[in-house]
Amino acid sequence: MTTQQSAQGQVQAGKPDASTQEPKTLTRNERLDRLPFNKAHRKLLIASGIGWAFDSMDVGLVSFVVTAIAKDPHFALNPSQKSWVLSIGFVGMAIGAALGGYLADRIGRKKVFTYTLIIYGLADALMAVSWSLPVLLIARLIIGLGLGAELPVASTLVSEFSPVKQRGRMTVLLESFWAVGWIVAALIGFFVIPNTGDWGWRWALLIGAVPLLYAIVTRTQIPESVRFLESKGREDEAEQAVRYFEKASGVEPVPSPNGKPLPKVPTSALFGHKYLGRTVAIWLTWFFVNFSYYGAFTWMPSLLADQFGSLTKSLGYMLAITIAQLPGYFLAAWLVEIWGRRKTLSIFLAVSAVAAFLFSQASSVPMVLIFGMLLSAANLGAWGVLYAVTPEIYPTRLRGAAAGASAAVGRIAAIVAPLLMPWFLTMSGGNKAVAFVVFAVAFILACVSALALPELTGKELED
């Protein structure tokens, strides 16, 4: 044997065999990020999405039933009272979003998600049997508390379980269940309200109480966030949650070091040097998107009924406009991982502005349907991306509170916009022109704000 061969043999002898090497150590979040989309992700998405659809159905139902309630001789609502029925729920949503996000960072995403469904399910039943306007408003306020707390928490939970390359797409697809809820609401509005007499709107709301039953299933179907569990030092539960997703992909678990509980991050950090710019940008985007969306779509059934002289026809037109939300969501879900969050969001908002202006000038049924469907698709696609980007731009211990605070700011606009509608209608002689020009301007402002957001496509969430 030559000296060179002997030296090579010594080197190889001292080199560990690949089969005996220790497996690479990954954090639990890295283990989640490496996974492909699997049946566990699908189960999480559907379970969360069904709750999301029920939320949407409730918001949609109110926009449909308020016209029927106004015609009910027992209530006989004037335009101002109709505005309050629409807006009082958003007061609850603003409070619920801020409170729910705060609690999600302290007691867990899953608990808040479940309890809020129960709250608004019971309140929906109360609204259905309301015997006076004050009871109607109180029930609607409580419904808003549940809805406001649930939405940002659900998007945070899905975002934290999503693989990094699928995170934006999964969150947009979660938001697409909003369209499913609105479609169901439109179907109920079209078939139930006009065909069941004076109790039509009550039957419609009772259907909206179904989430109370669904909440029982939620606790067993949705795991708690791994990031939240680790932040609380609950290592064994975090490991079980990760292995649940790994098993669904057929991936062998690798060792993960136990992390240290993360230090508390005060909510005031939203306004600190690191996060102030993104907080201002996301709050402005949420405000103007909410202003335009809730001002337009909560009043649209009533506006179309007035324009074309038929509640039944109005509900049929709304069904077509609502169905257009689905392709908007699916297009946004595809583009959000190709173009990135910021570009996709700003383009969809710009298209929404154009569609809102064209809708303001539409006088014939074909034009109302074309521009209404374009507005619906672009606006709801933007909503999907907005829910995707919001939890991404903050760290784990601040994520729930930050998402809730952003939603709460948006709900302030959702309160204001329906209340301003009677004034907009007076300015334009009873038609929709002024209102939708204002909404177009709000979409432009949202677009400008979105351009100031950080781009985090393909990057890991911050702990």
Image (cartoon, grey):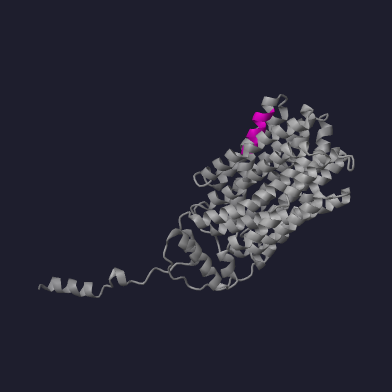
Whether residue 374 is in magenta: the answer is yes
Q: Position of residue 412 (x, y in %)?
A: 76, 50
Residue drawn at x 48%, y 67% as measured from the top left: 27
Question: Is residue 429 in view?
Answer: yes
Give the extent of the magenta segment. Answer: 368-377
Q: Position of residue 164 (x, y in %)?
A: 50, 55
**Residue 274 versus residue 239: which sits nearer the camera?**
239
Count numbered badges in the picture. 0
Q: Nearer the viewer, residue 230 or 220?
A: 220
Residue under the point 80% across and 49% down:
128
Q: Is residue 21 above or below residue 369?
A: below
Closest to the observer, 21 or 322: 322
The dominant secondary structure in magenta is helix
On screen, residue 93 above or below 432: below
Q: Give coordinates of residue 252: x percent, y percent.
A: 41, 65
In the image, residue 282 above or below residue 83: below
